[in-house]
Amino acid sequence: MVSNKQVILRNYISAGFPKETDLYVTTGDIELKLPEGSNGILVKNLYLSCDPSMRPRMKKLEGSYVNSFTPGLPISGYGVSEVLDSGNPEFKKGDLVWGRTGWEEYSLITAPHLFKIQNIDMPLSYYIGILGMPGMTAYVGFYELCSPKQGEFVFISAASGAVGQIVGQFAKLLGCYVVGSAGSKDKVDLLKNKLGFDEAFNYKEEPDLNVALKRCFPEGIDIYFENVGGEMLDAVLLNMRIHGRISICGMISQYNLEKPEGIHNLIQLIVKRIRMEGFLVLDYYHLYPKFLEMIIPRIKEGKIVYVEDIAEGLENAPTALVGLFKGHNVGKQVVAVTRK
Amino acid sequence: MVSNKQVILRNYISAGFPKETDLYVTTGDIELKLPEGSNGILVKNLYLSCDPSMRPRMKKLEGSYVNSFTPGLPISGYGVSEVLDSGNPEFKKGDLVWGRTGWEEYSLITAPHLFKIQNIDMPLSYYIGILGMPGMTAYVGFYELCSPKQGEFVFISAASGAVGQIVGQFAKLLGCYVVGSAGSKDKVDLLKNKLGFDEAFNYKEEPDLNVALKRCFPEGIDIYFENVGGEMLDAVLLNMRIHGRISICGMISQYNLEKPEGIHNLIQLIVKRIRMEGFLVLDYYHLYPKFLEMIIPRIKEGKIVYVEDIAEGLENAPTALVGLFKGHNVGKQVVAVTRK
């Protein structure tokens, strides 16, 4: 038996921002050996991912595509892990994997949604970021849904986040004009100075988002990569160009509200002949090998960079996760359980 | 000189339902001969179309894809007309045409957006209905945008209107399960008994649209053909199936409001991976010959029928037009200027 530190959900959180006290860290124990006859996988977790989609799972959900967390048990999400023992012929001791795991030091995974990590010359934490779900999300939401073309005007909200920063760099590589919004001066600087965006603004300092968008896009927006919802979406609708496309990846501004804000400008979909489409990356994992083939060389050549915000240790995991919904992270929020 | 009865807009109407007194009928006069050297077309108007898209033109619009009407001048819209004199080589005296014309007995058309009517064995009024813009709108919005498949669940709002009744029949011909909403018992009866819808309901008598939709679609909706917007769209979003499609043709419930209602359930676009797309039929007129080839035989065989609500004479035109926004018409609202 060894000790196993875990991050537990105290109770369901129906509305409002999650607080650190909604989670707690405790220490259980675990046998570092699979039970006799198990076809599960025992892993040591290395990196855990803080994702916006974890907020809905803190509510009591019914009939959703995801399951609620269970109060009193460790929460779960995407992670990078090392296989310690395996009853599943697809994985063996020593494999590095990414996929669904628990927020704890060690997890026994019985229904694996795991990818084996082949390219170990990349930072391992990238597999919960640019080389994992967020990277695939950017790839699918931009290339598959937006039909982007060189020279088009692209706007990305939550642009310095795990997904947004990749979408912006994809759009720049294609020769688009790219603007991002974010919630602090540091993030805006990052977008302009490190990530190569043509323009960026701090939405918290704009008294009128419509005015901000008109300033950045005097000719209008061809493609909007939507991460936030609410007021921003309404303002974007007023600034779309004819035959524009909106890829709806997330609506993080709405996840903590009891009732989502109303969107008033949908008539623009007709006037401007706009296509607006939501997606879930889980429908597209058959494209994952093609995606890796495209992105790994670009990372190696320095044409695409990735900014992470790494919290050290499970003790700091609750702060990191609740901070995500307040926008405290600059770049992809990662929890390093242990460094490898 | 002959007298020329005309329907005039008194003043811009910013918000609220148009009233009959917002329009008036007057009699001017007109020379039934083109001015020397004109390349225009002089027509006698036979049928005029009452269309929801005429409501925005009663406001003072800026930067829209349509022009506002001019207070003090006749309003304009789609009509079926006979050419009396032509300075345009594409049209000659005696031709029957449909397209943009004035709400008056005779119009001098200088920038023609007109189609020559070839199949004169059809009722001429059909060319502002099933064989004209509304027919093309149904065709494009359903076949081009919705990717419909046999057996799918299709919902249509304003289903007995000029466009909705055609969409419903297209969907039935394809083997879909089709439900429509409308605003009176007569309309609901029409949908169920004459137009072949599987089910229909009167939205004005449903205390909860979500409940009504769940009753009609226990398995959910694959395709929504949107004509009304507002509360109905919000309820539909809750009832869409995975990979559903929403074709946004119009939002008539919103046209008379100062500020459009808010739509709160767009998060469903992500959860259900829904594609929602607005369109304008004017982008698709290259498909018109193909459309006629498809629909005319089906009308002749009685596989598709068309219900019109015809007001007689320009004197009754204001009542007919304002009645459209109150839902007084049963079927496509037409004004017969003179019978041919």
Image (cartoon, coloured by chain):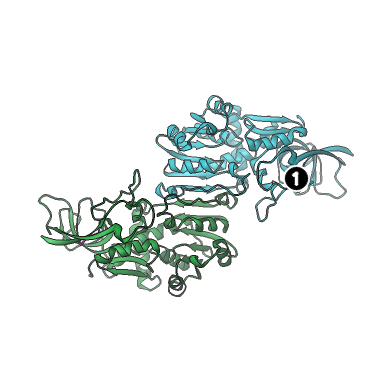
Chain colours: A green, B cyan
Task: Report in which chain the residue with disc 1 lies.
Answer: B
Position of residue A314 relative to residue B335, above or below, is below
Residue B122 visible in the shown view = no
Q: Nearer the viewer, residue B137 or B258?
A: B258
Q: Could you say which quadrant of the image residue A292 lies in? A: bottom left
Q: Which kind of residue does numbered mark 1 sit on?
A: Glu
Residue lying farthest to the front in this orientation:
A21
Q: Nearer the viewer, residue B330 or A120?
A: B330
Stretch of the chain drawn in magenta: A101-105
Q: Position of residue A279 (x, y in %)?
A: 41, 52
Q: Position of residue A215 (x, y in %)?
A: 58, 67
- Image quadrant occupied by the N terminus of chain A: bottom left
- Image quadrant occupied by the C terminus of chain A: bottom left
Q: Position of residue B179 (x, y in %)?
A: 49, 33
Residue A145 visible in the shown view = yes
Task: Give the residue displayed 66% in from the left and 46% down from the top.
Answer: B15
Task: Give the residue displayed 14% in from the left and 62% down from the top.
Answer: A3
Q: Main secondary structure of the magenta part?
A: loop
Secondary structure state at the residue bearing disc 1: loop
Label 1, on which residue? Answer: B90
Task: Give the residue displayed 51% in from the left and 63% down from the top.
Answer: A154
> Count the marks: how many?
1
Q: Nearer the viewer, residue A329 or A22?
A: A22
